[in-house]
């Protein structure tokens, strides 16, 4: 179960050791630390993407929500602006109408979704914490898209089980974004495979888990990174072996794996 407090304790992306050869031909170890959680390990390149392609096109309401979130102590949990732009484009491309989000926090990915779906589109949004959702809600209301959102406070798993009791919900969702407790992703997956329509998409966030998926088990890692690392590795293997979905793992943000239901 994710602890928001421990997630909040997250520091910027992990420090990286780089081997470099200096002018005298000597091997040198350079210690570098990037100040963002994108897996693109260059501040300059990442900033270039944000400043060239993301911020100039970011809707005003998303900018406001990002700024509100930046003042919150757990702000490292938020979906990044480039990932928000990606989700918004993806939802438009697939023409998503009935959607779901597990893990809302202050609502940046939720607003990216709400702005992408049509006027009569819906988002069933779940989070154990309503307070954070309410922090971003004024920006969502100002954008005129709050009517699309059905927010449920509490753990997501029982809500999914409840949905499954009604046959009408089976195969009915166009898109689901999962960005919550990593130790439950496989439990979500089994349920979502029944709730998402054939050809529908599930996006799992943080599937590269701060780069820790390729670190040796005994490498130094922050406590919460270590705790979820094995769950994320297990998820990635399970999704790769699951013939009910086509998959595509993208190095956007902290890694997003898209699953398209085909069975
Ligand atoms: C990484 S944040 C979500 C970020 C969000 N998508 C955004 O764009 O800002 C993870 C969220 O999952 C929520 N969460 C943790 N466990 C949960 C559970 N069992 N059910 C629903 N939400 C949960 C946390 O309260 C937290 O707000």
Image (tube, rainbow, N blue to C red):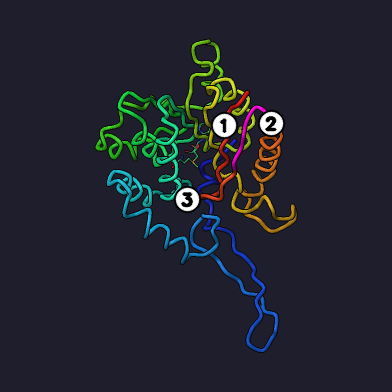
Q: Nearer the viewer, residue 232 or 20?
A: 20
Mark 1 and ligand 1: say if the CB distance to the nearest ligand atom is below 8 Å. Answer: no
Disc number for residue 260: 1
Q: Secondary structure at mark 3?
A: helix
Q: Which residue is mark 2?
A: 242
- The residue under the point 40% across, 57% down is 50
Tell me where residue 124 appears, x and y as whole percent.
43, 25
Q: CA distance from mark 1 to mark 3?
A: 28 Å
In-image side of 239 versus 107 (left or right): right
Q: CA distance from mark 2 to mark 3?
A: 31 Å
First-in-chain label (2 vs 3): 3
Q: Nearer the viewer, residue 246 or 134?
A: 246
Q: Check contact, mark 2 vs mark 1: CB within 8 A.
A: no
Q: Quadrant of the rendered structure where residue 244 is?
A: top right
Mark 2 and ligand 1: say if the CB distance to the nearest ligand atom is below 8 Å. Answer: no
Magenta extent? 242-248
Tell me where residue 150 appears, x and y as whole percent.
38, 24
Instruction: Quadrant for the N terminus, please.
Output: top right
Q: How would you rate the neighbour count of disc 2 (Cα within 10 Å): few for under 14, some for 14-19, many for 20 or more?
A: few
First-in-chain label (1 vs 3): 3
Q: Which residue is mark 3?
A: 76
Q: Nearer the viewer, residue 150 or 96?
A: 96
Q: Check contact, mark 2 vs mark 3: CB within 8 A.
A: no
Which marked residue is nearer to the observer: mark 1 or mark 3? 1
């Amino acid at each position: 179960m994710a602890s928001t407090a421990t997630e909040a304790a997250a520091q910027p992306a992990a420090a990286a050791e780089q081997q470099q050869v200096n002018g005298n031909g000597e091997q040198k170890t350079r210690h570098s630390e990037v100040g963002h959680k994108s897996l693109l390990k260059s501040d300059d390149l990442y900033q270039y993407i944000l400043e060239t392609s993301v911020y100039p096109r970011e809707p005003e309401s998303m900018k406001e929500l990002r700024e509100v979130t930046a003042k919150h102590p757990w702000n490292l949990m938020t979906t990044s602006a480039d990932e928000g732009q990606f989700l918004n484009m993806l939802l438009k491309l697939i023409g998503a109408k009935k959607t779901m989000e597990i893990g809302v926090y202050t609502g940046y990915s939720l607003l990216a979704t709400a702005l992408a779906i049509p006027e009569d589109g819906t988002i069933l949004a779940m989070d154990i914490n309503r307070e954070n959702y309410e922090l971003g809600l004024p920006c969502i209301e100002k954008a005129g898209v709050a009517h699309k959102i059905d927010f449920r406070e509490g753990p997501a798993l029982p809500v999914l089980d409840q949905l499954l009791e009604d046959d009408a919900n089976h195969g009915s969702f166009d898109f689901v974004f999962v960005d919550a407790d990593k130790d439950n992703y496989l439990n979500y997956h089994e349920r979502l495979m029944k709730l998402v329509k054939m050809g529908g998409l599930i996006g799992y966030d943080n599937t590269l888990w701060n780069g820790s998926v390729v670190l040796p088990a005994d490498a130094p890692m922050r406590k919460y990174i270590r705790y979820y690392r094995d769950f994320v590795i297990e998820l990635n293997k399970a999704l790769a072996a699951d013939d009910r979905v086509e998959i595509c793992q993208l190095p956007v943000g902290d890694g997003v794996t898209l699953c398209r239901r085909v069975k």
